[in-house]
Image (cartoon, rainbow, N blue to C red):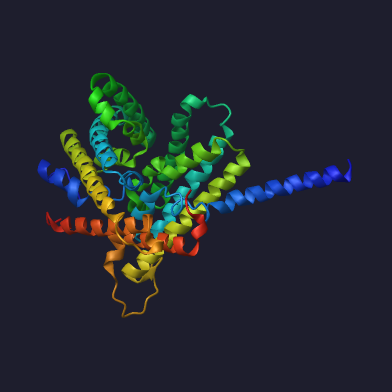
Amino acid sequence: MITQNMNLFLIFLSAMIVNNILLIRFIALCSFFGISNSMEASVGMGLAVVFVMAMATTVSWLVYHYLLIPFGLLYLRTAAFILTIATFVQLEEMVIRKMFPPLYRSLGIYLPLIVTNCAVLAAAFLVIDYNLSFVKSLVYTLGVGCGYFFAIVMFAGIRERIILAPIPKSFEGYPIIFITASLMSLAFLGFKGLFGL
Amino acid sequence: MSTETISAQQAAKEASKAGLLRELTKGILRENPILIIMLGLCPALAVSGSAGDAFGMGMAFTVVMVCSNVVISLIRKIVPSQIRIPVFITVISTFVTIVDYALKAYLPLLSRSLGVFVPLIVVNCIVMGRAEGFASRNPVAASLMDGIGMSLGFTLIITLLGSIRELLGNGTVFGLAVMPAGYQPFLLFILPPGAFLVIGFLMAAQKKFFPKGGRQ
């Protein structure tokens, strides 16, 4: 559990490893399984997620605390967040293309795909649910993003090896990949006792 | 009217009936959203720790899926195609908000255990995928059937997943003790790794016993 009283480093580690968004929380699995068949794509997607997530949570935190609460519009939370994120990704794509062409080339098509990546929306909801302050929200989000990057890149590495392994016919393709994910999730579960939580 | 045209009309009617039925049943196995199209995995794995939660998620999903499919199909001709995605998202998020608040008011316990996954139905790829891929190009009746079929397939698999995990991990199904009293619960199955394990085996079984349904 993450609370307002934890220090920044603990929040970061907890978000990144103990509550890993892919393997423990099961958020954003579509992209996890869809993209991890290529190492290069995984790195690209991972970077894009870290970047967009940090920006999007910042904006949605501000929207929530300075727009939705003062005007009593809490019931618009879901709609407001998803629209904020969609607009923001679009905007960000334009800015990056203009200002940082090399970064744009390496992120490529992954930027627009992120709108439908539930990790970004989930991070925005979670910092609100945990009632974190602005700085802690940002640190938490960075932790979540790094956890995503970490897990997807490791998994892509494993998948490159799986292709070469002899596997029973009916387990070929996705079934064996899920079972591999299960083992990885088990490893991450081992961190559960790290902070005596 | 001659008998020929009447029989032709009847045939057309029956054909469209069969078509509707096909839209309904395709989601259950042949195009099952989770096992075959591989969409909507996040909620399927995350809230299937117990059969009750899984079924609740299935129901919440059904409401959003069916309602948004129908509405999107109704407005499909007046929405300009450039802005269709934001419009679809707005429609979907309206229904998600309704479901979220209804759950909070009437089933607070379920709402708490589903947590962030109720608002996350907005970005559930199945809902968006069906809106974009089906409801935006098909008439209302077909979209309704498609929505019901997809929801049935989703609910079926997620409840099955929840039941298996609860049975192995806790010895119960829907909270009722099923296993004999001496059964030692295999805790792993209600923890996150169990979800991946069970869905892996379900997919392998589906591949072995219904090999025709594979993705193209």
- Say which residue appears at 37% left-offset and 43% top-offset: B120
Query: Residue B36, position in %: x, y?
Result: 46, 52
Q: Is residue A18 above or below residue B187?
A: above
Whether residue B37 is visible: yes
Looking at the image, the residue that sits furthest to the top is: A98
- Say which residue appears at 58% left-offset and 44% top-offset: B144
For residue B98, which quarter of the picture?
Answer: top left
**Between A67 and A60, the one nearer to me in the picture:** A60
Q: Is residue A19 above or below residue B191?
A: above
Looking at the image, the residue that sits furthest to the right is: B2
**Between B20 and A192, the one nearer to me in the picture:** B20
Whether residue A7 is visible: no
How many numbered marks appear?
0
- Say which residue appears at 36% left-offset and 62% top-offset: B198
Q: Which image quarter holds the C terminus of chain A?
A: bottom left
Left or right: B21 in relation to B100 = right
Q: Is residue B191 above or below residue B77?
A: below
Left or right: A1 in relation to B210 = left
Query: Residue A124, position in %: x, y?
Result: 28, 37
Query: Residue A135, position in %: x, y?
Result: 16, 34
- Say which residue appears at 19% left-offset and 35% top-offset: A138
Query: Residue A68, position in %: x, y?
Result: 32, 30
**Between B158 and A6, the one nearer to me in the picture:** B158
